[in-house]
Image: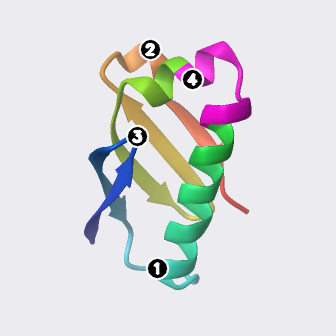
């Protein structure tokens, strides 16, 4: 499943696996809250990834953040 979220005034696609036990709206709320928190309080490497974010993949309780540079991509725990 695919949906879009607005992050830093631009749409970012979010891809889900359909076997998630959590409701999609709850996961999206946790994701946007975590992203907003990390862009304000995160370290330099995390902010670099978020500034070049191109897509997000939700796998279980983790969000895989894909950025323009493959070296900047990382995983973020949601729960």
Q: Earlier in the sequence, mark 3 or mark 1?
A: 3
The label shown at residue 8 is: 3
Task: Name the image colouring.
Answer: rainbow
- Of badges 3 and 1, the one in the foreground is 3
Q: Residue at x 59, y 46 (%)?
A: 36
Spatial separation of the CA atoms under disc 2 and disc 4: 13 Å
Spatial separation of the CA atoms under disc 2 and disc 3: 21 Å
Residue 71 in the image, given as x and y percentages of width and height = 44, 14
The label shown at residue 47 is: 4
Label 4's element?
helix
Q: Main secondary structure of the magenta part?
A: helix
Residue 21 in the image, given as x and y percentages of width and height = 57, 83
- Of badges 1 and 4, the one in the foreground is 4
Q: Earlier in the sequence, mark 2 or mark 3?
A: 3
Within 10 Å of disc 1 (Cα), the crowding (few <14, some 14-19, many 20+) is some
Quickly name the residue at label 2. Answer: 71
Q: Earlier in the sequence, mark 3 or mark 4?
A: 3
Cβ atoms under marks 2 and 4 closer than 8 Å = no
């Amino acid at each position: 499943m695919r949906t879009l979220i607005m992050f830093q005034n631009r749409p970012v696609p979010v891809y889900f696996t359909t076997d998630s036990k959590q409701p999609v709206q709850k996961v999206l709320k946790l994701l946007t809250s975590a992203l907003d928190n990390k862009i304000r309080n995160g370290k330099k490497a995390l902010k670099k990834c978020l500034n070049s974010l191109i897509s997000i993949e939700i796998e279980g309780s983790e969000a895989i953040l894909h950025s323009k540079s493959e070296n900047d991509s990382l995983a973020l725990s949601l729960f």
